[in-house]
């Protein structure tokens, strides 16, 4: 009996709120409380736009259509959005006014940006990437301030010059060690990963050489075949160059004496010197390492070192056989145990 009465009262309350909302001038509410930041057309194009980071939400964008349902908009109006200039209006607006304002925003500005009009890449980005990398690819405010290192800014020209499509596909697939970037290969198909990388390139990296290829229909197919699915998988069992054969026992001794101080006895990148090094030493146990470090890849990295890191070129100290020995130890002990 009590349950039935509760349901009846709840239904009556919802009906009363809906009826009240219909009698509210929602357009006037929007002009009074929202347009100063979100603009008269809901596209975020306002005088406040230049002074806010992140800028006001563009309700007309396909990404907003993906991310913003009725409940999320209502919650944002009611409670505000942490890390942004969006404050909560609960003290000044009634529930009926919030409902009316939510409906107005969805029907007036988001009607032409239905999910069906978006691309598969934009939908994947909205679902899996935007929470950290933000709507604009610059990095969400909470993530840039709360994560160390912060998410990369795809719009930064220097960062663009250091990235390749293959590198980005590997990062999405297997993650990045010592960062909050996790690997998505267990949840996304190869096609989804390729597509979301192309979306990031075309949407946030305009002007880069990768974007010019991605935006050229005549080159896109060839680029995808050359640098797409086939390159997300490294043949992990490739042999050493020049018919070299590594020796595990000699390699272990070399690793312990020369490598473990940075890379750790367990190969996890947490040796006693790692605390003082930035970027951190390679974690050989990470999924990205195990997916990409074949014997030839290890041999090359150990021989030549790594630019802009403390990893030296050991070919100045070791001969090729010694490099093969330590590479064999790392490969068999940590990469492919």
Image (cartoon, rainbow, N blue to C red):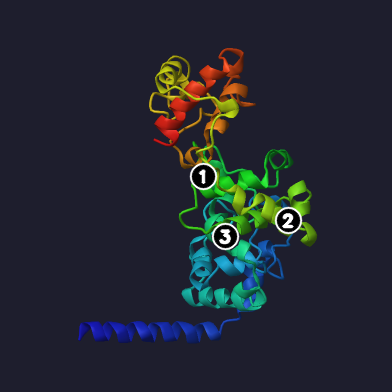
* CA neighbours of label 2 inside 10 A, class few (<14), some (14 to 19), many (20+): few
Label whose residue precedes the other's in the sequence (3 or 2)? 3
Calculate the distance from the C-alpha at mark 2 to the C-alpha at mark 1. 26 Å
Calculate the distance from the C-alpha at mark 3 to the C-alpha at mark 1. 15 Å
* CA neighbours of label 1 inside 10 A, class few (<14), some (14 to 19), many (20+): many
Asked if labels 1 and 3 touch by Cβ distance under 8 angstroms, the answer is no
**In the depicted view, which residue is nearer to us: 218 or 99?**
218
- Residue 298 in the image, given as x and y percentages of width and height: 54, 29
Q: Residue at x 51, y 46 (%)?
A: 174
In the current view of this chain or complex, which residue is farthest to the front? 243
The quadrant where residue 191 appears: bottom right
At mark 1, the secondary structure is: loop
Report which residue position mark 1 lands on.
Answer: 175
Marker disc for residue 120: none
Report which residue position mark 3 lands on.
Answer: 192
- In what quadrant of the picture does the C terminus appear? top left
Q: Residue at x 49, y 87 (%)?
A: 19
From what the image shows, is residue 210 above or below residue 272?
below
Q: Residue at x 51, y 58 (%)?
A: 188
Marker disc for residue 222: 2
- Residue 111 in the image, given as x and y percentages of width and height: 64, 77
- In what quadrant of the picture does the N terminus appear? bottom left
- Residue 150 in the image, given as x and y percentages of width and height: 56, 41
Q: Is residue 149 visible?
A: yes
214 relative position to 305: left or right: right
Asked if labels 2 and 3 touch by Cβ distance under 8 angstroms, the answer is no
212 relative position to 244: left or right: right
Q: Please state the total of marks drawn on the protein image.
A: 3
């Amino acid at each position: 009996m009590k349950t039935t009465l509760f349901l009846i009262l709840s239904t009556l309350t919802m009906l009363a709120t809906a009826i009240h909302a219909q009698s509210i001038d929602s357009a006037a509410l929007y002009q009074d409380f929202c347009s100063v930041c979100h603009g008269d057309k809901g596209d975020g194009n306002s005088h406040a736009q230049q002074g806010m980071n992140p800028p006001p939400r563009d309700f007309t964008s396909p990404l907003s259509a993906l991310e913003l349902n009725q409940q999320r908009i209502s919650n944002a109006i009611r409670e505000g959005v942490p890390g942004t200039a969006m404050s909560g209006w609960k003290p000044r607006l009634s529930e009926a006014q919030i409902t009316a304002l939510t409906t107005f925003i969805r029907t007036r500005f988001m009607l032409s940006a239905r999910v069906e009009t978006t691309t598969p890449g934009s939908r994947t980005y909205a679902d899996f990437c935007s929470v950290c990398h933000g709507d604009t690819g610059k990095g969400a405010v909470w993530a840039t301030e709360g994560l160390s290192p912060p998410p990369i800014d795809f719009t930064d020209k220097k960062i663009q010059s250091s990235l390749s499509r293959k590198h980005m596909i590997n990062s999405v697939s297997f993650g990045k060690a010592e960062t909050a970037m996790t690997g998505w290969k267990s949840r996304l198909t190869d096609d989804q990963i390729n597509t979301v990388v192309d979306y990031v390139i075309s949407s946030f990296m305009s002007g880069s050489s990768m974007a010019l290829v991605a935006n050229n229909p005549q080159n896109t197919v060839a680029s995808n075949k050359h640098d797409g699915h086939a390159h997300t998988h490294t043949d992990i069992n490739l042999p050493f160059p020049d018919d070299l054969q590594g020796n595990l026992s000699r390699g272990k001794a070399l690793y312990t004496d020369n490598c473990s101080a940075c890379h750790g006895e367990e190969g996890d990148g947490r040796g006693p010197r790692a605390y003082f090094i930035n970027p951190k030493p390679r974690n050989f146990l990470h999924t990205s390492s195990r997916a990409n470090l074949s014997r030839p890849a290890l041999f090359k990295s150990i021989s030549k070192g790594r630019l802009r890191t403390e990893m030296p070129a050991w070919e100045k100290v070791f001969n090729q056989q010694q490099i093969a020995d330590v590479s064999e130890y790392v490969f068999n002990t940590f990469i492919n145990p």
